[in-house]
Amino acid sequence: KAGVTQTPRYLIKTRGQQVTLSCSPISGHRSVSWYQQTPGQGLQFLFEYFSETQRNKGNFPGRFSGRQFSNSRSEMNVSTLELGDSALYLCASSLGDRVGEAFFGQGTRLTVV
Amino acid sequence: AQRVTQPEKLLSVFKGAPVELKCNYSYSGSPELFWYVQYSRQRLQLLLRHISRESIKGFTADLNKGETSFHLKKPFAQEEDSAMYYCALSNFNNAGNMLTFGGGTRLMVKP
């Protein structure tokens, strides 16, 4: 079956702009989580969506938001971009029942200049 | 707050040598622990989880609640084991899928 697909793979944005990243989970998976990966902070949880509802949220400012659609596809948005938002953004999908194996996408590399 | 610590950023061993990647956690509830691996140019993938008690690619990990550790071990390292390894913890009582990752250990297996 097809894996988790993230688009675009690479993005370059200017400070102050906003950006939207997309994630298509594995078919049948209802949970989508987002993580930020940086050399300094490592992998940090952003938020998780399940059946179109945000179920968990990490410790990130309100500039980071997300949503999930009825087909389980998810988007995350970052507004008023800062240089420190440059990172690899990973999406993971899972069935959503309690804690299960998370399947990761290849990520979107965001560079803010 | 939950925390995962991987004390070694880099572990270098020779092929055939034993490997132990350390992972310590702090969490007040009942945790579920995982090891994820990322091979070069590949996506992050699950290696093993403590509740399954499996051996994957020769790797095993035992949850030690007394020492709050979940070390990953393999008796004889292979060159293809070279990768980035992440220990991760999830809240057992939370219906959600929130993983807390350690900083990762890069394993290099030399020929």
Image (spheres, coloured by chain):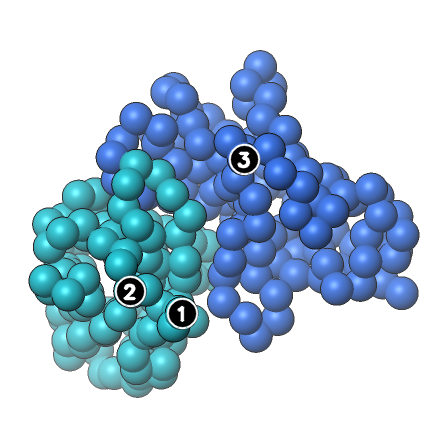
Name the residue tied to disc 3.
B52
Front residue of A96/B108: it is A96
Label 1 sits on what residue type? Lys
Identify the image quadrant of residue B87. Answer: top right
* Dots 3 and 1 on the same chain: no
Mark 3 or mark 1: which is in front? 1
Label 1's element? loop
Name the residue tied to disc 2.
A27
Residue A1 tag number: 1
Which quarter shows the C terminus of chain A?
bottom left
Q: Image point 57% across, 74% down: which residue?
A: B41
Q: Are marks 2 and 1 in contact (CB under 8 Å)?
A: yes
Q: Which chain gets the cyan colouring?
A: A
The colour applied to the residues of chain B in this rendering is blue
Q: Position of residue A10 (x, y in %)?
A: 36, 83
Q: Are marks 3 and 1 in contact (CB under 8 Å)?
A: no
Q: Image point 19% across, 67% down: which residue?
A: A73
Horizontal side of residue B26 vs B9, given as left or right: left
* Dots 2 and 1 on the same chain: yes
Q: Mark 2 lies on which chain?
A: A
Q: Position of residue A39 (x, y in %)?
A: 48, 61
- The span from disc 2 to disc 1 (Cα, nearest Å) is 8 Å
Q: Which chain carries label 3?
A: B
Q: Position of residue A53 (x, y in %)?
A: 10, 50
Check the image and report above or below for B50 versus B43.
Answer: above
Q: Image point 61% across, 58% down: which residue?
A: B84
